[in-house]
Image (cartoon, rainbow, N blue to C red):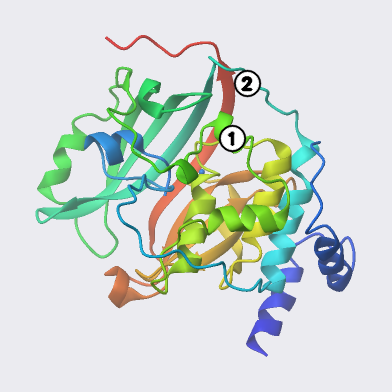
Amino acid sequence: MDELAQLNSFRSEVPAQEDLRAEAERLMAGMSAPVRSGFRRLALRATLAGGLAAAVAAAVFVVQSPPAPVPPPPMIRTVAAVEVLSRAAEHVGSRPELHPRPGQFLVYESQSMDTSGGDAGIWLSRSKRTIWLPVEGSAVKGVLQEEILAPLPYPGRTLPPAARAEQALVGKPGRPERAADFDDRAEFLRNDYAYVSKLPTDTEGMRKHLYTQVPNDGLQDYEAWNRVGGLLQESYLPAAQRAALFRAAATIPGVVTVKEAQDAAGRKGIAAAMVSPNGVREEYIFDRKTYDYLGRRGVVVDAKLADAPVGSVVSSSAQLKVSVADSPPIVE
């Protein structure tokens, strides 16, 4: 009954183009067919080179002697999540497609807020960043430029003295620097255009990709959900693969809908989400009309696990622009 109540509330937020059953049936019919073509973020400096704290998209994982992989669980579709993600899949061809060539760079402009700090205290770091990532291969050739924004207190705490280093950088645009000193991601975790443009264009194939070598540790579905984010933030999939990604994401058990969400730039939308083992609801936010991907947000749902009041936003991002460039800025 609670799920039905949630669904009825959600339906009022989504354009009612046809009956929900017809919507689901159309999605099911298209599950096995290729789709016609029509943002934890990567945070490479933070993850790979010890820069700022890891941000809102898939972290870079190094797989070392992983447990025996297990097959993906049976497809369980949450009706409301199917509604959001299937509409996102249907709208992938509504905008002009980018066609980057080998040797070029995809340029991602974004804004983010992430938890930073440690024993000396924690706070919320904020920044705007532009990253130039090569169309093919390792991110070592990428270039990053960041502008530090004023840090904020972690929910329920005061801003610690350790955050002063960030405060001193506010208003001082950073210089271009190497995005990564090394890139040890496993092949199946790559998100460069040359790789993702060859991913499956059908739902089942994309779903298998999301569950590739996922450890059998009880967190398989959340890991698959996290990998969805790694293919959204600072990654650009062709329309066919993007649609397959959204449809595959709708089959991950535990996905729910959030009818009111807001990205790091203040843009409002609707989200599909899953609760993390740390008591934070990880949301992927879409524009309410165009269903373009806007960014992601982490909202506390378990105060004890997250060590913050319920409803607090502890991470967010906004993917502001994606473009193509022949070369990145020169790193001095």
Please give left or right for residue 85 compared with residue 302 in the image: right
Compared with 77, 115 (above or below) is above
Asked if residue 262 can be seen in this view, the reply is: no
- The residue under the point 60% across, 61% down is 272
Compared with 24, 228 (above or below) is above
- For label 1, the SS is loop
Q: Nearer the viewer, residue 111 or 250?
A: 250
Asked if residue 313 can be seen in this view, the reply is: yes
Reading the image, the residue beneath label 2 is 100
Reading the image, the residue beneath label 1 is 236
Q: Amino acid at mark 2?
A: Pro
Q: Amino acid at mark 1?
A: Tyr
Q: Nearer the viewer, residue 55 or 267?
A: 55
Residue 171 quadrant: top left
- The residue under the point 21% across, 61% down is 157
- The image shows residue 226 at horizontal and vertical percentages of 47, 56
